[in-house]
Image (cartoon, rainbow, N blue to C red):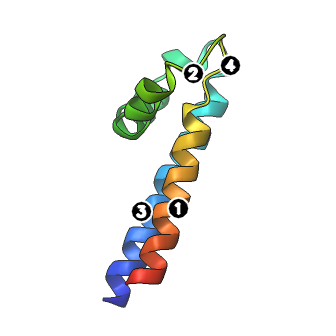
Amino acid sequence: MLILKIALVRLLDVITWMIIIKALMSWFPGAMDSKIYQIISELTDPIEAPVRKAMSKFTVGPVDFSPMISIIILMVISRLIMRLL
């Protein structure tokens, strides 16, 4: 059970870092056309898309807060896994 807990927490950490890398890459114009960005986007969009859709009612302007909200949700899930398992 301990191995499962560690594996799940590490997986959530990797996903969190991919979201951070994707957000940083979005600041550079040519980076969004790269293959790395496309791969990271395909892996993180299932997590960010529902958050982006829910936040669309409250978001005004060009700033997308869905990566930050997604990271917070992943951190909460990680903490729950650490306490429950």
Q: Position of residue 12 (x, y in %)?
A: 45, 60
Disc 4 target residue? 28
**Residue located at (62% from left, 28% from top):** 25
Q: Amino acid at mark 4?
A: Phe
Q: Position of residue 42 (x, y in %)?
A: 35, 32
Element under label 1?
helix
Q: The C terminus is located in which quarter?
A: bottom left
Camera-nearest label, 2 or 3: 2
Distance from Cα at disc 3 to Cα at disc 1: 14 Å
Element under label 2?
loop
Disc 1 target residue? 76
Q: Quadrant of residue 32?
A: top right
Q: Amino acid at mark 2?
A: Phe
Q: Earlier in the sequence, mark 3 or mark 1?
A: 3
Relative height, residue 33 to residue 25 (above, below): above
Disc 3 target residue? 11
Distance from Cα at disc 1 to Cα at disc 4: 30 Å
From the viewer's side, name the closer residue of 80 and 34. 80
Camera-nearest label, 3 or 4: 3
Q: Earlier in the sequence, mark 2 or mark 3?
A: 3
Relative height, residue 83 to residue 33 (above, below): below
